[in-house]
Image (cartoon, helix red, strand yellow):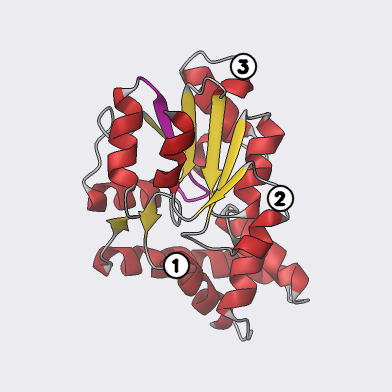
């Protein structure tokens, strides 16, 4: 088994259970502008992407007006902040213990997300997770110039810990975009999980090394 030194982990649907509120809110925000898209369409098109880019991509697919993307994104951001203030956020089952165990084995943990840093920090605060206890670094869409599936967030995480060999990095996520991000970075392991946005058939298209029900199952290949 490869000597993994850094785990780069997606947030919503991979480490955090927020009941798909992001994509439900995104669906509502788009439909507020006179469209009629389903949650399933949003999940299959937008999962894992930076959200303004996701909205633009969705509008292209449904032949909508791409000029609506920015106002829809602003509407979505406002609605999401309200939703998160009232939402009960929990870790995916087994994940908190998994994070503590990985860090006890001197592996670095980077949480990465297509969210803004404001939304990501709100989620982490609701969980009560602490930097240097549950994770080592948070990297968000605000920290990079190119969003997933660009490997820029993973490269930034590697740089923070002076890891030069991507074979020593594991990337895990609940969307095809997550796995593509890991492959584009040259990660030694890519893991898809079924606890979030996309199903097994969709995830298999990206050819991850493993598909697990939840992230905690990865412990068996890391110990």
- Secondary structure of the residue carrying tag 1 is loop
114 part of magenta stretch: yes
Q: In this view, does 115 lie to the left or right of 91?
A: right
Q: In this view, does 29 lie to the left or right of 94?
A: right
Which of 213/10 is in front? 213
Please tell me which residue is depicted at 59% across the width and 26% down the height of the picture: 155
Mark 1 — residue? 20
56 above or below 8?
Answer: below
Q: Which numbered mark, 3 or 1, is in the foreground of this view?
A: 3
Q: In which quarter of the image is residue 97?
A: top left
Please tell me which residue is depicted at 69% across the width and 37% down the height of the picture: 183
Percent x, y of residue 82: 32, 68
- Secondary structure of the residue carrying tag 2 is loop
In primary-sequence order, the first of circles 3 and 1 is 1
Magenta region, residue range:
106-116
Mark 2 — residue? 206
Circle on res. 165: 3
Question: What separation in Å lies between label 1 and label 2 (alpha carbons)?
Answer: 21 Å
State yes or no: discs 2 and 3 in contact (Cβ < 8 Å).
Answer: no
């Amino acid at each position: 088994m490869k000597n993994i030194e850094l785990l780069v982990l997606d947030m919503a649907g991979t480490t955090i259970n927020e009941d798909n509120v992001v994509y439900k809110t995104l669906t509502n925000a788009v439909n507020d502008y006179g469209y009629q898209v389903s949650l399933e369409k949003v999940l299959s098109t937008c999962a894992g992407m930076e959200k303004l880019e996701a909205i633009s991509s969705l509008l292209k697919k449904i032949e909508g007006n791409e000029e609506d993307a920015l106002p829809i994104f602003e509407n979505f951001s406002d609605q999401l902040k309200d939703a998160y203030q009232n939402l009960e956020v929990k870790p995916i089952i087994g994940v908190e213990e998994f994070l503590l165990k990985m860090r006890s084995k001197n592996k670095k943990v980077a949480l990465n997300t297509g969210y803004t840093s404001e939304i990501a920090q709100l989620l982490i605060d609701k969980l009560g997770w602490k930097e240097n206890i549950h994770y080592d670094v948070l990297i968000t869409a605000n920290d990079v110039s190119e969003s997933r599936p660009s490997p820029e967030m993973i490269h930034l995480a590697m740089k923070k810990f002076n890891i030069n060999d991507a074979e020593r990095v594991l990337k895990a996520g609940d969307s095809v975009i997550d796995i593509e991000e890991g492959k584009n970075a040259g990660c030694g392991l890519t893991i898809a999980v079924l606890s979030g946005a996309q199903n097994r058939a969709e995830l298999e298209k990206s050819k991850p090394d493993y598909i697990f029900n939840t992230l905690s199952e990865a412990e068996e290949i890391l110990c």
